[in-house]
C-alpha cells in the first residue's frame, strides 16, 4: 500500500504498522469492509470515515487562526480506501492534466513550474513587451472546492460511474472533529472541501484546478485574450496545486477579461481569488497604462525579485545578497549548544541530513554565486570540525 508506518493515527488510534503486525487477526474484517465498498454499499461507512483536525503552526509565534495549517488525522480504514483509489488514479494523471500543472503527478516537478515562469518572464523582459505577471492566491483552496463541480470535471474526463460512486461514498460520509487542547469537539459533516491528509485529495484537487488553466488557454485560442507574443509560443499560465501564475498584456481590456475568467471559474468551482494577497509585477509597463490595468484587478503591485514556490524569482541570476536569507537559515539550524555533546560522526550525519538538505530545493532551480556556496561550505565545515559556525585555520583535519 506504500502508506508510511509511523504517521499519527486517526480517531481509531491505529497505524499501518499495527495493521501489518496484526493482519492475520483483522484481515477478514478489512476484506468484508472493502467487499461492501466494492459493491457500492456505503451505508454505515461514516463511522469508519471520521477524522481529527489538528492545527500545525506555519511559523514560530503563531497566534492567529491563519497562522495554522489544518491537517486531518483520518480513520485507518478510510485512509486505506482513499489510498486504493489514489493508486488507481495516479497512473492516469499524466495523460489527463495539462503540462502547466505539475503538482502530485509522477514524473513532474515543481522546479518545472519555476523554470517555466522564470524563462517566460525573462523572455518577455528581453522582448521589451509591456506585460503583467500575476501571482494569484486562491483563498482556502482545499476547503472551498465544490463537490458538484468536481464531479462534473471527473465526468468530463471520462471517469466511470463506479469510480465516481466510490469517491462520492468517501466524500459524503466524511466528518471531522477539531482537536482543542487535545480534546475532540463535536462532529462537523462535510458538504464541500477536500481533506488535507487524505491520500486522494491532492489528485482530485489537481484535476479540478486544471480547468482554470484550460479556460485561460481557451480564451487565448478564441481571441478573447491576446497572445503574449504574436510569433513566439510563450505559456500564459503556470499551476502548481493552488499556486497560480498568469501572464497577460498590460491593458485594461486584458486585465478585465482575466478578472471575469477568474470570477467565472471561482463561482463554478468555489476557488475564489484573494486579490489582497495576490500580486502584480509589471514588465515594461508605462505608469498610465499600468494604473488603469491594475485597477481592474485590485491587487498590490510588487517588484522583482519575488518568492515563487519558495524560490526567489528574478530576471537575472540571483545575487549573493538575494540568497543571504538561505545562508542565514542554514546557520540558524546549527544546534550549537548541543555540539559539545556530539562526536564528529554525529555532526557529520547532521551536516548531511539537515544542513546539506536545506539549500537543495533552491539550488535545483539555478546556479548560485560562488560566494554563496563558499558561505554554506564554511558553515558546514565549521560545525563539523569544531561545533561552531566557523572554524579557524588548523582546526580542520582530513583523515
Image (cartoon, grey):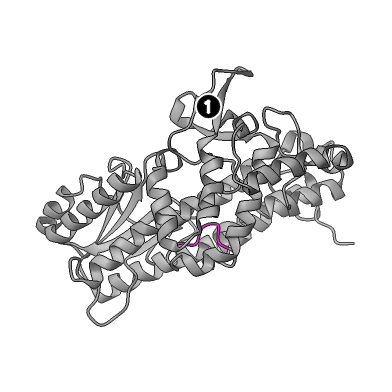
User: Label 1 crowding class (10 Å Cα cut-off): few <14, some 14-19, many 20+?
Assistant: few
Q: Quadrant of the C terminus?
A: bottom right
Which residue: 62% across, 34% down? 45
Q: Is the residue 48 above or below the residue 325 in the image?
A: above
Q: Main secondary structure of the magenta part?
A: loop
The residue segment tinted magenta is 101-105
Q: Is the residue 169 above or below the residue 224 in the image?
A: above
User: Residue 279: in sight, yes or no?
Assistant: yes
Q: Is the residue 67 above or below the residue 327 in the image?
A: above
Asked if residue 119 lies in the magenta stretch, the reply is no
Q: In which quarter of the view is residue 219 placed?
A: bottom left
Q: In which quarter of the view is residue 124 placed?
A: bottom left
Q: Position of residue 346 (x, y in %)?
A: 84, 46
Q: Position of residue 97 (x, y in %)?
A: 46, 64
The answer to whether residue 231 is left or right of residue 358 is left
Which residue: 42% across, 49% down? 150
Q: Is the residue 125 above or below the residue 135 in the image?
A: below
Amino acid at each position: 500500500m506504500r502508506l508510511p508506518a509511523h504517521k499519527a493515527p486517526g480517531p481509531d488510534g491505529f497505524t499501518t504498522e499495527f495493521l501489518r503486525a496484526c493482519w492475520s487477526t483483522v484481515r477478514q474484517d478489512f476484506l468484508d469492509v472493502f467487499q461492501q465498498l466494492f459493491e457500492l454499499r456505503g451505508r454505515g461507512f461514516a463511522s469508519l470515515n471520521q477524522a481529527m483536525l489538528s492545527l500545525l503552526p506555519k511559523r514560530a509565534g503563531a497566534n492567529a487562526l491563519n497562522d495554522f495549517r489544518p491537517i486531518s488525522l483520518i480513520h485507518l480504514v478510510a485512509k486505506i480506501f482513499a489510498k486504493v483509489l489514489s493508486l488507481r488514479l495516479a497512473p492516469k494523471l499524466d495523460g489527463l492534466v495539462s503540462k502547466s500543472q505539475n503538482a502530485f503527478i509522477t514524473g513532474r516537478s515543481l522546479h518545472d513550474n519555476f523554470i517555466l515562469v522564470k524563462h517566460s518572464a525573462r523572455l518577455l523582459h528581453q522582448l521589451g513587451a509591456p506585460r503583467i505577471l500575476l501571482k494569484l492566491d486562491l483563498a482556502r483552496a482545499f476547503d472551498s472546492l465544490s463537490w458538484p463541480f468536481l464531479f462534473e470535471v471527473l465526468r468530463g474526463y471520462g471517469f466511470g460511474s463506479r469510480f465516481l460512486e466510490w469517491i462520492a461514498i468517501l466524500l459524503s460520509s466524511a466528518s471531522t472533529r477539531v482537536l482543542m487542547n487535545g480534546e475532540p469537539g463535536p462532529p462537523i459533516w462535510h458538504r464541500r472541501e477536500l481533506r488535507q491528509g487524505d491520500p486522494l485529495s491532492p489528485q482530485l484537487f489537481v484535476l479540478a484546478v486544471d480547468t482554470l488553466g484550460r479556460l485561460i488557454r481557451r480564451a487565448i485560442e478564441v481571441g478573447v485574450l491576446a497572445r503574449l507574443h504574436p510569433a513566439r509560443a510563450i505559456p500564459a499560465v503556470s499551476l502548481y496545486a493552488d499556486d497560480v501564475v498568469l501572464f497577460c498584456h498590460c491593458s485594461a481590456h486584458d486585465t478585465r477579461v482575466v478578472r471575469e475568467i477568474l470570477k467565472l471559474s471561482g463561482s463554478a468551482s468555489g476557488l475564489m481569488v484573494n486579490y489582497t494577497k495576490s500580486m502584480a509585477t509589471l514588465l515594461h509597463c508605462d505608469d498610465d497604462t499600468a494604473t488603469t490595468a491594475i485597477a481592474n484587478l485590485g491587487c498590490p503591485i510588487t517588484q522583482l525579485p519575488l518568492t515563487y514556490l519558495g524560490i526567489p524569482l528574478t530576471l537575472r541570476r540571483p545575487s549573493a545578497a538575494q540568497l543571504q536569507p538561505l545562508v542565514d537559515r542554514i546557520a540558524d539550524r546549527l544546534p550549537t549548544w548541543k555540539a559539545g555533546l556530539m562526536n564528529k560522526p554525529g555532526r557529520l550525519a547532521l551536516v548531511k541530513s539537515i544542513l546539506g538538505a536545506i539549500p537543495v530545493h533552491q539550488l535545483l532551480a539555478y546556479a548560485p554565486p560562488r560566494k554563496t556556496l563558499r558561505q554554506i561550505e564554511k558553515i558546514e565545515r565549521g560545525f563539523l570540525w569544531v561545533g561552531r559556525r566557523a572554524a579557524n585555520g588548523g582546526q580542520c583535519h582530513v583523515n
